[in-house]
Image (cartoon, grey):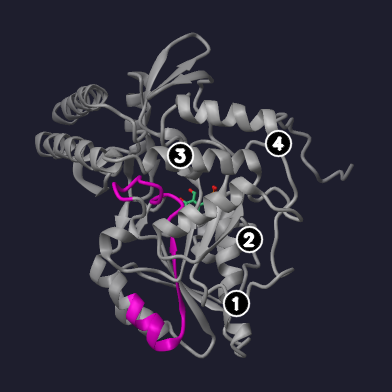
Amino acid sequence: MNALMSNAPVPPLLPVYKRAAVTFERGEGAYLFDREGRRYLDFGSGIAVTLLGHGHPHLVATLKAQAEKLWHCSNLYGVAAQEQLAERLVAQSFADTVFFCNSGAEALECAIKMARRFQFHRGQPERFGIIAFEGAFHGRTIATISAAGQDKHLEGFRPELPGFDHVPLGDLARVEAAIGPQTAAILIEPIQGEGGIRSAEAGFLAELRRLADEHDLLLIFDEVQTGMGRSGRLFAYQWSGVTPDVMTLAKGLGGGFPIGACLATARAASGMTAGSHGSTFGGNPLACACGNAVLDVLLENGFLARVEELAKRLRHQVEQLAAAYPGVIQGVRGQGFLLGLVCTPPNTEISAKLMARGLLTVPAGDNVVRLLPPLIIGPAEIDQAVATLDEVCQELAGQEAAQ
Ligand code: PLP
């Protein structure tokens, strides 16, 4: 052993997460239960993953039935559930084709490779650069931490992958100035999730579309967090009317089963020929069966309309809280069930207080507390969450007044 190395004990789990002192044992609908049997209302959904809550009967039955038939099948062969899921995603979106993988970061890896390969295929291999936005989050691989360009994620992991330019969200002049002979694509989250629920304006997205068309760049929307109904539409881009060339999905796509996807137009995918990309587990039969089951529910008549209605109820109530406690909540951001409370006290403190009262939320950048309930949430659970938020706001406002 190297004498300079620390002898400090390391836990069996690599300590890269600051974990809360709670371990969940089971879930039921919008609730999680810890080892002591305490119930929590889950307004975090495993960071926008468990779209249909916990133990959704259709998801459970589908997964069990697929487990009886086939777990894994190499992509050297046809995979029926994968083909079906691809056809359905294509039918519901701008895309012509889909690549399946296992996570959001992998979906972004595919999108980044696709942009390079698109330009290579057009005879312009020098165009490998991607313009991305400050405050973005695209995953934790070397390419995706380079794409987001955040110092806190790059520290100690440099050198970063070359070619990424970072410009402020919404600053069209800076985007235009960043376009050069090496630029291949523009990459943006329609609503920045980890960055603090910061929305790109529809007009800004439309201008990015125009610039991409003018300069033969691919426009890539990262919908890993915003996609699959979380915004109240199946995909957040559908609010803006602006379509990308490439879109990444993961998180909610499998309702909790790991799966990611990179969707693209035929033109954008033109460089992705046989042998150019792959994944052992990507498009696994269990994962795709779950993806199909999630879509079965999301596409049910009236499901997303109900999400939109209930999301308005939640938004209205938290806006009332913001008005009642301006010293605690400065404002409300987001769309559908991807909401952010911009806080004055530290967001981690507020999230911890909510958790102590049985409500799970997720902190984000910009001192935001995210509310990400499962899409199956009902009005009574929304009211319960708002009552808990009210209690915590009251306590914090009281502390503020006493100071
Ligand atoms: N892109 C966005 C917008 C995300 O929010 C995330 C995760 O939070 C990722 C990519 C990375 O996804 P994963 O953690 O599945 O790799």
Q: Which residue is mark 3?
A: 294
Q: Which residue is mark 1?
A: 116
How many residues crowd around disc 4 within 10 Å: few (fewer than 14), some, or many (20 or more)? few
Mark 3 lies on a secondary structure that is helix
Q: Pick the residue in front: 138 or 352.
A: 138
**Amino acid marked by disc 2:** Ile
Does the magenta portion include 224?
Answer: yes
Q: Which residue is mark 2?
A: 142
- Residue for point 42% across, 34% down: 45
99 sits left or right of 315 in the view:
right
Mark nearer the N terminus (4 vs 1): 4
Give the residues in magenta. Answer: 208-233
**Amino acid marked by disc 1:** Arg
- Residue for point 18% across, 31% down: 400
**What is the C-alpha distance between the residues marked 4 and 1?**
35 Å
Mark nearer the N terminus (3 vs 4): 4
**What is the C-alpha distance between the residues marked 1 and 3?**
32 Å
**What is the C-alpha distance between the residues marked 3 and 4?**
19 Å
Mark 2 lies on a secondary structure that is helix
What is the number of callouts on the image? 4
Mark nearer the N terminus (4 vs 2): 4
Does the magenta portion include 323?
Answer: no
Q: Residue 200's quadrant in the figure?
A: bottom left
**Amino acid marked by disc 4:** Leu
Q: Which residue is mark 4?
A: 70
- Residue for point 58% across, 71% down: 114
Q: Is mark 2 within 8 Å of ligand 1?
A: no
137 sits left or right of 378 in the view:
right
